[in-house]
Amino acid sequence: MGRREQNKAKKNAALLQAGLELFLEGGVERTSIEQIAAQAGVARGTFYLYYDTKEALFETLVDGFLDPLMQIFDRVEAGLDKAQGPGAALAVYQVMAAELAMLGLSQQKRVLLLFREMRGPSMDGLRARELALIERITELTRLAMDRGLVERGDPQLASLVILGGIERLYFEVLIGEIELGSPAELAAKAAVLLSRVLGVG
Amino acid sequence: MGRREQNKAKKNAALLQAGLELFLEGGVERTSIEQIAAQAGVARGTFYLYYDTKEALFETLVDGFLDPLMQIFDRVEAGLDKAQGPGAALAVYQVMAAELAMLGLSQQKRVLLLFREMRGPSMDGLRARELALIERITELTRLAMDRGLVERGDPQLASLVILGGIERLYFEVLIGEIELGSPAELAAKAAVLLSRVLGVG
Amino acid sequence: MGRREQNKAKKNAALLQAGLELFLEGGVERTSIEQIAAQAGVARGTFYLYYDTKEALFETLVDGFLDPLMQIFDRVEAGLDKAQGPGAALAVYQVMAAELAMLGLSQQKRVLLLFREMRGPSMDGLRARELALIERITELTRLAMDRGLVERGDPQLASLVILGGIERLYFEVLIGEIELGSPAELAAKAAVLLSRVLGVG
Amino acid sequence: MGRREQNKAKKNAALLQAGLELFLEGGVERTSIEQIAAQAGVARGTFYLYYDTKEALFETLVDGFLDPLMQIFDRVEAGLDKAQGPGAALAVYQVMAAELAMLGLSQQKRVLLLFREMRGPSMDGLRARELALIERITELTRLAMDRGLVERGDPQLASLVILGGIERLYFEVLIGEIELGSPAELAAKAAVLLSRVLGVG
DNA sequence: CATGAATGAGGTTTCATTCAT
DNA sequence: AATGAATGAAACCTCATTCAT
């Protein structure tokens, strides 16, 4: 990479970092492009060389979480297709859980940003991705039911309840205003509660 | 009520209604006071005779849901204090469920508004009320555990999971983009899933 | 008129005057709304209470000339309809000439502005009005030919040549860089030249 | 010409062509240097290697018409000086007419650009050239009067009227919104009308 | 009480111009 | 010579808020 490209990459990273922090502090709506540029250490006009709008910057930020998230589910789907027997399927789900945990931990701020802005107005693009996500999770739940891994029931309903529970827990962990114990313990206890929703075993 | 007061009440109601609709359409931030005044059929200056800022109007709107919600939990707490035996306690919880359903149904738009804006920035006042809510729910769960109505466990964790599940379900119902069946059926099925989290019976 | 309306009218007049002067000095394109507001002695935002864009202000300015101009031709047309005999028709044309002269003299700056901006880009609305004007003049010429007041010929061609000649003369008079003698003398001599194009007599 | 110079010439031509088209489409003011460079297929910075400002490019464009135009009049003046007798003088005028026609036909876009921008602001340099042009035409007219080729009269006035008539006709031909018949016919008929202004014969 | 005209701060966006590569 | 990234001035426009009527 030439000196020029390196510099561009550095500026882009600075803009993303500045956007992430400011969006979390004051929300996308209340953050001005001027603020982002200043925090990133570039001129106002420079912002527009990288992103057309602050919404585009926001999308790049959440895509950094949503794209890998979707890829995890892609791999799960492929894995379940090949899996023979309940043991193999269970292994796929366990790998998924580990990958989700890794992703969630490595992208904490982006996830928090996503939670904060997701239900806001003019987030139609995001809502579409959320719906796609819900569909995929529902499909995985349905498969698990079909294979007898969990109790039979309404896969969509169960998926929504679990998704909501995880969201709320994760949100409170990220915010950190409630004492919730060590992450490891928390994860273990949450897994027990959520598996009850599905009726595992 | 005199003519004057009647007129004031009518204008106030018009402002609340206009704010509710516009906030839901475009979000609080993107809605201008001019828009609200116009939709309510009053002059811009008149808005300030009723509310200092549009955030004050917003708070009045969500208070219309949050205050009754808190009152329900107040009554539950008082009821449980007086309740003697598991049967009486259960009756209190059932009344609570009915009241929550009524409230949720009668204030759908305000609840949706709350969901939409709750996690946004500068909603510190709201966050405080949310934390208070979580504390109360946790307390109710703890009581239920102490009295042997549900399985012993971490009351806070269970409360958060249940709250998250309900939020997500209710949100999807209000948005209406996902086919979820009749409300009555949905409520019944959701009650089963959520009671599993608590380990009822 | 109440105090408020009087004030509004005064501000509007100030904006029109400021716009006229600044547009003439630097052209519509190069004049900023801020300049206009400052020259008119109002705040930037106030401009937008009166006009949506500076182009709207410009249109109001030229309409102040174009509307009366069109009305003159309306009256001529009506007059010629009623006129019986060449003498009456000629009288109509003479009244027209007098009215045009009055209008041109009373609106000099607006006419100059019109000349300056007319052929510029994004003046589609103006061009349409210009074409309408050309059509009307052509029609008058055709009528004069039909009635034997002037020599028979191509009415459109003659109209365009005369219009162009008048435009150029008027433009030079308004600019004042060329010594052209007294207006009265000039008008008389110009009338002779232009009537030759039509072949009067 | 070496490779280097050939390349430079090609780029210069591309810039001129791009400027001509874009200036006609959107006006000089609304056209950005970036647009010109892009259309010419060069980088933004490269523009500045050829022209200091877009106004310089504009001037080069109109000079491509104005310089030859002035040279025609130079030749006419020289020709009239040498011409002995009305016949020879007339021949000079006829050559002039032919040359003007050729020039006007070969540079249509540049002429249209000139018409469009000529009366705009900050075109002081252009206005000076226009005044020089008017002086020369007036001189030619005066000469023709002195030699008895046309009727005696105010040469400046006649020149302005003729110039205006030609401008308007040529402008309408270039714009093409008015049906004006074949150029040859039009020219013949226009010549008749304009010669009447001068009182030929 | 109610109005809506006026204000000016603050946001977005474009663009001529410079300069390191 | 040529590039195009970066700059920051300057334009546009909106809006919460004030205040005379």
Image: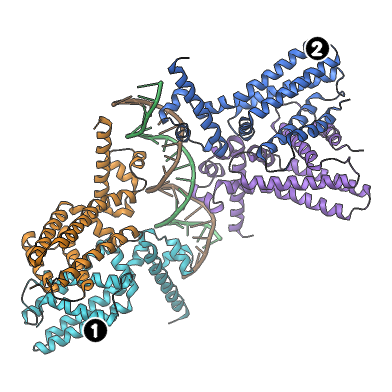
Chain colours: A orange, B cyan, C purple, D blue, E brown, F green
Q: Quadrant of residue B35?
A: bottom left
Find residue D106 and report its horizontal and vertical position in percent: 64, 27
Chain under disc 1: B
Crowdedness near tag 1: few (<14), some (14–19) or many (≥20) residues, C-alpha within 10 Å: few
**On the image, numbered disc 1 is attached to which residue?**
B98
Q: Are marks 2 and 1 in contact (CB under 8 Å)?
A: no
Query: Mark 2 or 1, which is nearer the eye?
Result: 2
Q: Is residue D138 left or right of residue A192?
A: right
Residue at image location 25% in from the left, 57% down from the top: A114
Closer to us: C115 or B193: B193
Using the image, determine if residue D187 lies above or below residue A200.
above
Q: Do marks 2 and 1 share a chain?
A: no
Chain under disc 2: D
Q: Is residue B73 visible?
A: no
Q: Is residue D1 visible?
A: yes
Find residue A139 and report its horizontal and vertical position in percent: 22, 67
Q: Is residue D186 left or right of residue A23?
A: right
Using the image, determine if residue C182 lies above or below residue C117.
above
Task: Name the mark on residue D20.
Answer: none
Helix or strand or loop: what does disc 2 sit on? loop
Helix or strand or loop: what does disc 1 sit on? helix
Using the image, determine if residue B90 lies above or below residue C71.
below
Rounded to the nearest angstrom, the CA distance separating label 2 from label 1 is 113 Å
Closer to us: C192 or A30: C192
Q: Quadrant of residue D99?
A: top right
Q: Is residue B60 left or right of residue B69?
A: right
Q: Which part of the image, by quadrant, shows the C terminus of chain D?
A: top right
Q: Amino acid at mark 2?
A: Ala
Crowdedness near tag 2: few (<14), some (14–19) or many (≥20) residues, C-alpha within 10 Å: some
**On the image, numbered disc 2 is attached to which residue?**
D83
